[in-house]
Image (spheres, rainbow, N blue to C red):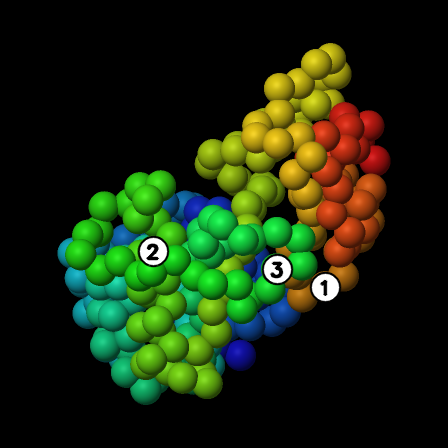
Amino acid sequence: MRILVLGGTSFVGRAIVEDALRTGAEVTLFGRGRTGTELFPGLPRLIGDRDTGDYAALRDGSWDAVVDVSGYVPRHVGQAMDALGDRAARYLFISSHAVYRRTGVGPGSTEETPRRPPVRDTEELSEETYGPLKVACEDDVVARYGPRATVVRPGKVAGPHDPTEALMYWVRRAARGGQVALPADPGQPATGRPPPLSRPCPPWARPPAHRAGGRDRPLPRRDAGDAAARGR
């Protein structure tokens, strides 16, 4: 299987590339060539820049799947799709849970939960615009590729090479013991899930809250913190 990854050398994209290589896929990377230059030395690298609209490197080639992990504004995905044309059998867009409206989301919510209105009049990423810009990107991908489009909306992602440490801070802090200040409502449900790897995820590799609560049973945030502290 031939896969083109738009990005793929930082965090989520890096994990996708590693997993694709484990399955025997032929992976090509597209990016600026500035991040993770030492990674994946045997893979073809196509150099371009999404911010400046430089997609010349994509003028040739065809792929069974394109994985877009670096599209944040509609211009990014629109120009990428224009450059690829019909040479992508499937376009997989990594979106975000931030597309959903903040009211009415709770345990049992599905992908049919109402999204926020799309935004197209800015490219400035902020707490207010990130989700709506992703909504606009989703709409454009689905409009262009129809049944050949796949949209993935991850929640908070944690793992190796996370540049933010946003979630792992709380796990490590809970593991140190003592009183821990939890954000928001301590009774808010939280569910830990292993990454969607192509191979089974062994129990020891799952987040502590996942092991304590089960795959689909959410824990109150205070209990998830306790599970992380116990390391089980």
Image coordinates for residue 81, horizontal then vertical, percent: 28, 75
Is residue 122 at least partly visible in the picture? yes
Label at residue 132:
2
Q: Which of marks 2 and 1 is nearer the N terminus?
A: 2
Q: In the image, which disc is placed on residue 109?
A: 3
Residue at the image point whose x is 70% and y is 14% from the top: 179
157 w.r.t. 182: above or below: below
Q: In what element is the residue under mark 1?
A: loop
Which quadrant of the figure contains the C terminus?
Answer: top right
* Residue 97 picture location, percent across and down: 49, 54
Marks 2/1 in contact by CB < 8 Å: the verdict is no
First in residue order: circle 2 vs circle 3: 3
Q: Name the side, left or right, on which 36 lies relative to 75.
A: right
Residue placed most toward the observer, 203 or 95: 95
Name the residue beneath numbered marker 1. 199
How many neighbours does mark 2 have within 10 angstroms: few (below 14), some (14-19), or many (20 or more)? many
Height in image: 104 above or below 173?
A: below
Residue 160 shown left or right of residue 151 in the figure: right
Q: Which of 232 and 13 is in front in this view?
A: 232
* Residue lying at 32% horizontally and 81% vertically, measured from the top left: 144
Residue shown at the point (48%, 74%) measured from the top left: 150
The amino acid on which the numbered mark 3 sits, given as a three-letter code, is Ser
**Amino acid type, mark 2:** Pro
Numbered marks: total: 3
- Marks 2 and 3: CB-CB under 8 Å? no
Q: Position of residue 123 (x, y in %)?
A: 21, 51
Q: Is residue 41 visible?
A: no
